[in-house]
Image: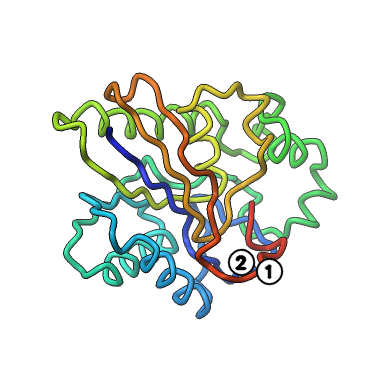
Amino acid sequence: MTQFYFVRHGKTQWNFEGRYQGSNGDSPLLPSSYRDIGLLANYLTDQKIDHIYTSPIKRAYITAKTLADDLGGDIPISKISALREFDLGILEGQKFVLAEEKYPQLIWAFRHDPSQYNPDIIQGETFDQVIRRTNEFIKQLAQADDSGQKTYLIVSHGAALVAMIKSLLGVPLAQMRKEGGMSNTGLTILQTSNHGQTFELLKWNDTSYLRRNLDITDTI
């Protein structure tokens, strides 16, 4: 089985403030996020990870690098543009509450029914575009694993991870947000036994190792 460990980046200042970050916005990890990353590393300490692939956006890369260091510092890391967050256009940097007031239908569709999401008004990226670039990369990794025994850790972003993972599982666009979003430093595991033709879900958005109660700003 080829396994994929998907991790959302650590919580950032803009996450805490309730702001959209997207692929062009960014903000620093909170000091507490380094603790959370360390707890994830402890949880994964007995798991052999062959390679870490990360979005090149700083909040994701710092999460990946910190995690790799906490796991011993010998796991190779590669930055992959295909793993970046949705381009949210003019929403980036805006507070959620203000965006909801200005674009209620758009935000509702983004969070509840992606089949109705049309980002033209914000000059953003569609779900289909994100799915195409992320799935292509993940399936290439699965196809290239001749041993069928590799484990890859993927560090990306909340909205991109939901679109990526649910589409790999064959979930229709309208149903992708049915189980909610991804939490900061949360872990989701998929595996494939046929080099990426189909995927099986083993774990969804696990945060049990963080040993704390999450609040509304932890998940998107």
User: Is 123 in front, or is 26?
Assistant: 26
Q: Position of residue 80 (x, y in %)?
A: 31, 46
Q: Which residue is most to the front?
A: 46
User: Is 173 in front, or is 104?
Assistant: 173
Q: Position of residue 193 (x, y in %)?
A: 30, 25
Q: Is residue 29 above or below residue 58?
A: below
Is 34 displayed left or right of 138 in the figure?
right
Quarter location, residue 135: top left
Q: Amino acid at mark 2?
A: Trp
Q: Position of residue 173 (x, y in %)?
A: 62, 24
Q: Amino acid at mark 1?
A: Glu
Task: State how far apart marks 2 and 1 are (Cα).
Answer: 5 Å
Q: Quadrant of the N terminus?
A: top left
Count residues near mark 2 (Cα–Cα under 10 Å), then give few for <14, some for 14-19, many for 20+: many
Give the colour scheme of this rendering: rainbow
- The local secondary structure at tag 1 comes to helix
Q: Which residue is mark 2?
A: 14
Q: Which residue is mark 1?
A: 17
